[in-house]
Image (cartoon, rainbow, N blue to C red):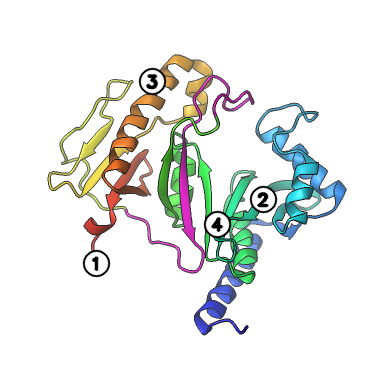
Amino acid sequence: MTAAPEQSAARERAARLADAAARSAGVHLRTVDDVAGLAAVADFFSDVWRTPRSTPPYPAEVLHSLVHAGGAVHAAFAGDRLAGASVAVFGRPADTCAYSLVAAADRGLGYAVKQAQRAWLLERGARTLRWTFDPLVGRNARFNLVKLGATGSEYLVDFYGPMTDGVNDGDESDRLTVTWDLAAPRKPDEIAGRAAAPVAGTAPDGGPLAHRSRDGRRVWCRVPDDILALRAADPALALRWRHAVRDVFVAAFAEGRTATGMSRDGWYTLTREEDSPA
């Protein structure tokens, strides 16, 4: 079946953007399906999540099975050094939706990795890509919502249950699902007005936790500056932040809101589609 002109154009744009992002980052990206290559990716993920390489969070044999099932492992190489990787599988409905199981990269390389993943999926007919991340990690939120143009579409309470890796141990595993329109990423919502909106909650550090606009069209929620450092230094305080942010998000999503923006100073924007400007 011949692809519609708009689909072909989206694929061509994605391929050009992926190539440009890789050149800008100084990396070479390719899919990996051999045993040695997948073992190197498994080791890379072990280092990122601070687990022994003997017990990686994503074992090589699991990665191999996912590739064999039609998924893809992308790897970014800076010279001969593995500097980033991602894993995508097809979701529901399998002919249009895909799921990014995991992605990690050295600082500054994440955009190139995601664009390679996007181009590969569009070439195979996918229209959207979903994945989850820790909503307390503000820099990841800004990358996902602003840099990529995805939407925070679902809040998941303690999604994985207890986690024992070197990054998440001691916390509860709330996750925010993001949905990325691969053909037409959303423009980020960075509407001003937060400072003038009434305060709608106090954060564990004593500062404002949330603002709600007087017309009800916007809710803003703050996350800590560096949850990973805070979790290591004061796990009890980090957990109080988890519960505080969870309360705001659960209430906002119950109102039909999604996460559509993240400011540089750590504030989410939560909106309803019917309240968005035309």
Magenta stretch prevailing secondary structure: loop
Q: Which residue is mark 1?
A: 278
Q: Of the numbered discs in the image, which one, if any, rests on residue 240?
A: 3
Mark 4: amino acid: Arg
Which mark is first along the chain, 4 or 2?
Answer: 2
Q: Of the numbered discs in the image, which one, if any, rests on residue 92?
A: 4
Mark 2: amino acid: Val
Element on which disc 3 rests: helix
Dot 1 crowding, Cα within 10 Å, few <14, some 14–19, many 20+: few
Q: Is residue 97 left or right of residue 249?
A: right
Q: Which residue is mark 2?
A: 87
Marks 2 & 4, CB-CB < 8 Å contact: no
Coordinates of residue 278 in the picture (x, y in percent): 24, 66
Q: What residue range appears in magenta? A: 161-189
Which mark is first along the chain, 1 or 2?
Answer: 2
Which mark is first along the chain, 3 or 1?
Answer: 3
Dot 2 crowding, Cα within 10 Å, few <14, some 14–19, many 20+: many
